[in-house]
Image (cartoon, rainbow, N blue to C red):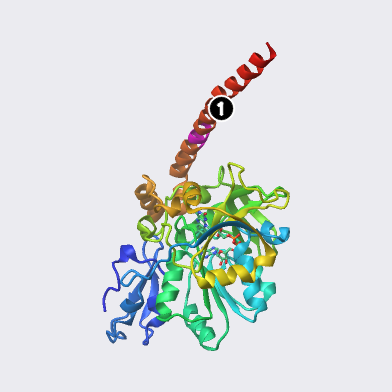
Amino acid sequence: MTEICPLNDCTGCYACLNICPRGAITMQENEHGVLYPDIQQEACIDCGLCQKVCPMCHSVELLPPRECIVAYAKSPAEQQTAASGGLASVVSRAIIRRGGVVYGSSAANAFDVKHIMVTEEEHLPMLKGSKYVHSKMGTLLRSLQYDLKSGRDVLFVGTPCQVAGARNFLRRDYPNFYTIDLVCHGVPPQKVLNGAIRYAVGDERNDIGSIAFRKKDERGRVAYGLYIKDVHGNEIYGKDISRDLYSLGFMKALFYRPNCYRCSYAQPNRVGDLTLGDYWDRENTSELPKERRFGMSMVMVNSDKGQKLMELISQNIMTENNSMENFKRHNAQLVHPMKEHPMADQFWTIFKAQGFAGTEPLMRSIMRKMRCQTLIAKASRLIYKIPLAERIIKKILRRKS
Ligand SMILES: Cc1cc2nc3c(=O)[nH]c(=O)nc-3n(C[C@H](O)[C@H](O)[C@H](O)COP(=O)(O)OP(=O)(O)OC[C@H]3O[C@@H](n4cnc5c(N)ncnc54)[C@H](O)[C@@H]3O)c2cc1C
């Protein structure tokens, strides 16, 4: 076998690497740092298993959501430390309390964001939060299969392409296998993040610990950005998107894996038993109590197992019915993949030659443009409001006269 699927389609799900009976497949970085399977020809026996499990060669069935719900964890502590409403954490806790295992992404080592297996509640905080980078799977799908065969409940949380990879790798439906897929913008390669970390804290520091991409204040407001801690847990760098170049590039789709711009999972039908995303209630229509909200999750229940998970956590969450139409209005990634930034080629050319630091002038120009766009958006919102305000004032004046 020389090629499993066209490289530009490869999502880096690791299903091929995990299935190979000869250990002939490793993941290798290209010049952008994007990980692709590399087949050692001397070891390959042409069994074709890698293609059989590749979701780009054999697509997995997508499920139309049965229910669309807005929800958040009842526990404010659970919410406050989570990406949005903390639903992934609440489900994970419930699975572990039943003696199960959770597979999810950890950024405990900022330079090596990867999926890990968690069996103890006290280790669940490692999975919390959205990591805006490709989370590596390693050979974890094999241990996931082992856990399933031994009869334990297994929860796998990941991007839709990762869930598709895990499902295809297993090649059968285990009754004890539960999946949560995330609504996803796209994932940059770790190499870009590593460059951004070094650019942020300098080359000398050798005490870098964990990383986060969102910060919530005591009122539940979220700041997207890059937040780096040292090995002792002290924040050594923290800037929000208005000042941090990596989070800006992430939000603007400047440096994702190539497949992300053609993602076939950026649509309403889903690959997981549950789908989770952000729901910010910007129009203030939710009737759920506000004083206990530190973010809300958009939840899609896509299967019987998804329903079972929701029943399992029903005592620990607040919920409200919603609709796919509304979700699609709030979240473009349920309708189409992110469009690659027009300056992406320029970014990669500079990144290859000079590293992340070299891209600073380009990134700053994108930042200036973003600030300009934000200003224009704010101004137009204000102008939009004026005729309304005018009409109200006129009405009041008419009543008085
Ligand atoms: C790269 C990325 C892009 C996203 N883009 C969008 C978007 O455009 N719109 C939207 O509505 N929501 C998006 N999300 C989802 C959203 O940010 C939250 O992850 C989701 O709402 C779950 O929140 P929570 O509070 O339940 O999660 P938490 O309880 O905080 O748990 C987070 C869960 O996410 C998993 N996770 C974190 N990072 C990764 C990763 N890199 N790869 C795989 N799994 C990961 C962890 O394993 C954990 O289980 C994105 C998430 C990621 C990781």
Q: Is residue 35 left or right of residue 78?
A: left
Residue 242 higher or lower than 108, as above or below:
above
Q: Nearer the viewer, residue 301 or 227?
A: 301
Residue 322 higher or lower than 170, as above or below:
above
The residue singled out by tag 1 in the image is 385
Residue 256 is one of the magenta-drawn residues: no
Start-end of magenta stretch:
371-375
Point out residue 161 in the picture as x, y percentages from the top left corner: 42, 66
Q: Amino acid at mark 1?
A: Lys
Residue 174 higher or lower than 179, as above or below:
below
Residue occupying the far top of the picture: 401
Ligand 1 within 8 Å of disc 1? The answer is no
Quarter that holds the C terminus: top right
Residue 205 seen: no
Quarter that holds the N terminus: bottom left
Q: Quadrant of residue 122?
A: bottom right
Residue 167 seen: yes
